[in-house]
Amino acid sequence: MKRPALVSFPEGFAADAIHDSYHVKQWNYACGGERGKRFERKASEFTVGVLTKLSFSKRELDIYQTDAITGHLCKQAKKKP
């Protein structure tokens, strides 16, 4: 997901933490290919729900709503713990 250069703080930081916390559920997480993008979309769907309940700004919601549709790939695959 391409984030604007200036991330709102503390909302942007909190939203990133919420998004990444979902990956804990995906213990077999892999960043590559369609599987990785699917995981990112699911994590962003989860994030949108939380941000909505917490009344986050439209800016933060838009970022994760877009990523829930498109997904993104991370720079390198993460190894299983």
Image (cartoon, rainbow, N blue to C red):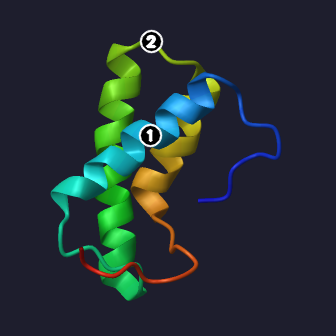
Residue at image point 41% right, 86% down: 32
Q: Residue furthest front?
A: 81
Residue 1 lies left or right of residue 35; in this view the side is right
Q: Position of residue 1 (x, y in %)?
A: 58, 59
CB of mark 1 within 8 Å of CB of mark 2?
no
Residue count near mark 2 (Cα–Cα under 10 Å), binned few <14, some 14–19, many ≥20: few
**Disc 1 crowd, CA 10 A, few/some/many (<14, 14-19, 20+):** few
Tag shown at residue 27:
none
Residue pictured at 32% horizontal, 16% vertical: 53
What element does badge 1 sit on?
helix
Residue 29 found in image quarter: bottom left
Q: Residue at x 52, y 82 (%)?
A: 76
User: Which residue ends up furthest to the right in the rendered image?
Assistant: 5
Please determine whether, in this image, residue 23 is positioned above or below residue 60: below
Real-space Cα distance between discs 1 and 2?
16 Å
Q: Which residue is mark 1?
A: 17
Q: Earlier in the sequence, mark 1 or mark 2?
A: 1
Q: Answer with left or right where residue 43 lies relative to residue 31.
A: left
